[in-house]
């Protein structure tokens, strides 16, 4: 069954999704109340995370924000694409994000790959900096996204590196790299199960089986067993059912479980069973990323409109909010979203160059809040 395109549901200005937007428009907003922009959340504090203010080192600021994952309300992983040198003169109203300068943080200028994986508490204070792994990202563009499986009692941390064609699996405390999916700096085509080609996102089944969107270079989904052995793949380039043009995001859930893939270039979400059989498509949205919430809804961030959209598992839009821009609460190219169990929402912006924390408003409708899935209790061998 084909769904009504999101563009007919949400009141958006499509041009705001374009990276070619004139610079003067970046500081402007569309008409509409604050509730349409931040939804059930308060306007974020521009000084979160606290570790970024002062900046990582004098005269610098974090660059593009590839990903964010909230393990708990007081442990949040940030995947940073290095640091950027600030201009010699910074306006007094500078809010602390590179997008303020009307430049995409991901492309101009080239970042210095330091402090690529850090962990902060709920107030944004630094807990850990995994600087020992910065060298992994020196020859690429930095980490793409970061995850923990909700079904892993050891809470391994998975970091996708699309530019080097691999996915890293670290111990929870970051002291050891325990597995690398793919072959570093080598890419394969759609039929190669040994190599990836610019992978983008990952999600799991309760038994540890997981699915990788692969991604920018290939046009497929690859299914792995819990040990990282590839089992099967599906997808090819095109516009038909089961074909893709940039399968960027992936979310898994439902009963029976289904695999939801953001076919970004074709402006749709496609739905499959766990063996890759096509089931449905939801047109009219081009998600950078998606997540499955604790109440089993698909939340997607739309690259066309910069809105956050809640779908039920049959593809009906239940709620949306958000707006393009660089002021607090507005977003520029949301790349990964995550939420803790208290309903705090975290959004990493690949062009805006920041990660924002959205706290629920008092009395907010709970059905409008994004809630992260609970993780299994940690085992004794999981590190810190």
Image: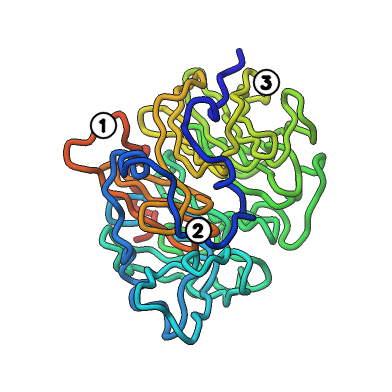
Read off the residue under disc 1: 366
Between disc 2 and disc 1, whose residue precedes? 2
Depth check, mark 3 against mark 1: the one in front is 1
Is 18 rendered above or below residue 222? below
Residue at point 49%, 26% (across, down)? 9
Between disc 3 and disc 1, whose residue precedes? 3
Read off the residue under disc 3: 278
Q: Is residue 186 left or right of residue 68?
A: right
Q: Is residue 77 visible?
A: no
Residue at point 45%, 52% (across, down)? 331
Q: Secondary structure at mark 2?
A: helix
Depth check, mark 2 against mark 1: the one in front is 2
Q: Is residue 294 visible?
A: yes
Depth check, mark 3 against mark 2: the one in front is 2
Read off the residue under disc 2: 26
Q: Label 2 neighbourhood size at 10 Å, few (<14), some (14-19), many (20+)?
A: some
Q: Is residue 292 left or right of residue 360?
A: right
The image quadrant that residue 277 belongs to is top right
- Residue 330: x percent and y percent? 41, 52
- Residue 223: x percent and y percent? 65, 36
The image quadrant that residue 267 belongs to is top right
Residue at point 42%, 71% (across, down)? 129
Q: Label 3 neighbourhood size at 10 Å, few (<14), some (14-19), many (20+)?
A: some
- Residue 145: x percent and y percent? 54, 53
Q: Is residue 279 left or right of residue 16?
A: right
Q: Secondary structure at mark 3?
A: strand
Is 382 rendered above or below residue 91? above
Residue at point 68%, 60% (across, down)? 163
């Amino acid at each position: 069954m084909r769904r009504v395109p999101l563009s007919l549901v949400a009141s958006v200005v499509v041009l705001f999704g374009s990276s070619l937007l004139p610079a003067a428009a970046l500081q402007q907003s569309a008409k509409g109340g604050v509730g349409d922009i931040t939804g059930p959340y308060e306007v974020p504090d521009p000084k979160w995370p606290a570790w970024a203010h002062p900046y990582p080192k004098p005269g610098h600021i974090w660059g593009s924000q590839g990903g964010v994952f909230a393990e708990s309300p007081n442990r949040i992983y940030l995947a940073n694409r290095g640091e950027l040198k600030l201009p010699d003169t910074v306006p007094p109203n500078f809010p602390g994000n590179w997008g303020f300068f009307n430049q995409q943080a991901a492309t101009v200028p080239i970042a210095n790959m330091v402090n690529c994986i850090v962990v902060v508490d709920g107030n944004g204070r630094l807990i850990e900096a995994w600087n020992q792994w910065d060298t992994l990202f020196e020859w690429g563009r930095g980490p793409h996204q970061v995850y923990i499986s909700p079904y892993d009692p050891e809470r391994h941390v998975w970091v996708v590196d699309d530019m080097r064609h691999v996915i890293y699996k670290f111990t929870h405390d970051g002291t050891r790299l325990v597995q690398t999916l793919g072959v570093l700096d080598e890419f394969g085509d759609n039929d190669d199960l040994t190599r990836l080609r610019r992978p983008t996102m990952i999600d799991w089944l309760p038994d540890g089986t997981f699915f990788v969107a692969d991604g920018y270079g290939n046009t497929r989904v690859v299914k792995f067993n819990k040990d990282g052995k590839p089992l099967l793949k599906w997808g090819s380039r095109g516009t038909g059912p089961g074909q893709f043009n940039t399968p960027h995001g992936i979310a898994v859930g439902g009963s029976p479980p289904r695999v939801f893939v953001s076919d970004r270039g074709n402006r749709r979400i496609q739905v499959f069973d766990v063996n890759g059989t096509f089931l449905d498509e939801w047109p009219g949205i081009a998600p950078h990323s998606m997540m499955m919430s604790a109440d089993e809804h698909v939340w997607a961030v739309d690259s066309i409109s910069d809105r956050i959209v809640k779908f039920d598992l049959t593809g009906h839009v239940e709620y949306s909010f958000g707006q393009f821009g660089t002021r607090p609460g507005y977003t520029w190219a949301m790349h990964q979203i995550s939420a803790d169990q208290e309903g705090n929402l975290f959004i990493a912006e690949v062009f805006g160059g920041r990660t924002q924390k959205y706290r629920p408003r008092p009395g907010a409708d709970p059905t409008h809040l994004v809630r992260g899935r609970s993780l299994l209790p940690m085992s004794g061998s999981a590190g810190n």
